[in-house]
Amino acid sequence: MARAAVVGAGMTKFGVHEQPLQELFGEAAFAALDDAGVGSRDLDALYFGNAMSGQAENETHLGPRMASHIGAAGLEVQRFEDACATSANAFKNAVQAVDAGVHDVVLVGGVERCTPETGKDTPEMTRIFASASHRQYEQPTGLTFPGVFALLTKRHMHEYGTTEEQLAEVAVKNHAHGRLNPRAHFGKETTVEEVLEGPVVADPFRLMDCCPFSDGASAVVVVNPEYAESFDDTVGVTGLGHATDIVPVADKVEPTATQSARDAAAQAYEQAGIEADDADFAEVHDCFTGAEVLATEALGLFEDGEGGPAAAAGKTALSGETPVNPSGGLKAKGHPIGATGTAQIVELTEQLRGEAGDRQVEDPSVGLAHNLGGDTGTTLVTVMEETA
Ligand code: COA
């Protein structure tokens, strides 16, 4: 059953940007509005995501500023913060508001600046990001997000025999995809050897196993199904799952299961009436190479323990049986926290419309987005389908 539909999508290039937040967000918002053929005065609401700018840039209460900048002062604005899952949650709430008849046309998007352009270097930004971890049990130990996902991945290696070479293949594949994406942070390919020779960040992750700090913004226009009929290029939202997981990481019963992803996927698949096998491609939250392996298993794309071998066998490449992260993923496209969730929706929209250029998946009908926040504390899974 098609519910709300996406009728416009836009994003900035992810990377290093000097512009202030409203200008960065405006670039993505105007691109989405232009794509939809909708004016900012036609909007009923802006559902907006930003996670870290309070700490990173001393900027809060961004909603009215974003609305003013796009010529929509007076508009209702809802602001979301869910760590790295921030704008996926904004998108879910926008779809639900449209489905419930509260609004007809909603602009959804997110923006974040995480590079030294903010005045914060890597150690300081790492500390700021770690505010999404457990204040009493994780932060005092010095555990950061590379460390959280390194722990989960080490456990996966112990349980299933996943290897550093298999993790490196994930980086090689996502950099190859990112090279085909003009809006990706990194436009260069890498090799297994280069990944394995890189400096260690948090064992088993080396530099090339990690996503970068990025600046960027993304936005989509969501409308109700009746209104969608007056648009040419619509993509239906057929499933939305949203679940949380045990935190801190040390309390997780089955750490490698990433239970929030399994629960969110089950909800989304049931709503959409699909099985994991029906997905033609997926955008997943590969903040680290090991996170992509865990995500592909939690989504049911591969059996537990098979995510690493599947990546090494090319099954998740653009030409493989289930392409994963055709955009380049967080690893190569980049990860401006509050913009990442809706950037995945932009990618699903472009792929399902057949507008993804050199990185186009062959004739897709069903796409998945998997966006997680914190130490897998929150996961949202979205199913989108080509509209006939
Ligand atoms: N992947 C590939 N290349 C990267 C990179 C990454 N993640 N991060 C930086 N680089 C490159 C830079 O472009 C630069 O290349 P150049 O010398 O050719 O210009 C070089 O590596 C050094 O960059 P620098 O910015 O000095 O790196 P850094 O040591 O300060 O930071 C990491 C590197 C991996 C530690 C940092 O990007 C990081 O912590 N990433 C994870 C972010 C995170 O935790 N996000 C939340 C996830 S839940």
Image (cartoon, rainbow, N blue to C red):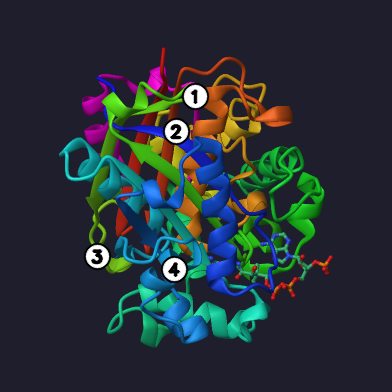
Does the magenta-highlighted stretch encompass residue 44?
A: no
**Numbered disc 3: secondary structure:** helix
**Numbered disc 4: secondary structure:** helix
In percent of width and height, residue 79 lies at 32, 65
Do callouts 4 and 2 mark residues in contact (Cβ within 8 Å)?
Answer: no
**Numbered disc 1: secondary structure:** loop
In percent of width and height, residue 13 lies at 67, 54
Residue to which mark 4 is pinned = 68
Mark linked to residue 233: 1
Do callouts 1 and 2 mark residues in contact (Cβ within 8 Å)?
Answer: yes
Judged by depth in the image, the label closer to the viewer, 1 or 3, is 1
Do callouts 1 and 3 mark residues in contact (Cβ within 8 Å)?
Answer: no
**Above or below 359: residue 286:** below
Q: Which of marks 3 and 2 is nearer the N terminus?
A: 2
Tell which quarter ligand 1 is in: bottom right
**Majority secondary structure of magenta residues:** helix
Judged by depth in the image, the label closer to the viewer, 4 or 2, is 4
Please give the range of residues in magenta: 261-285
Q: Distance between the residues labelled 1 and 2?
A: 6 Å
Query: In the image shown, does 194 or 129 lie closer to the viewer?
Result: 129
Residue type, numbered disc 1:
Asp
Q: How far apart are marks 1 and 4 (CA)?
A: 28 Å
Residue to which mark 3 is pinned = 251
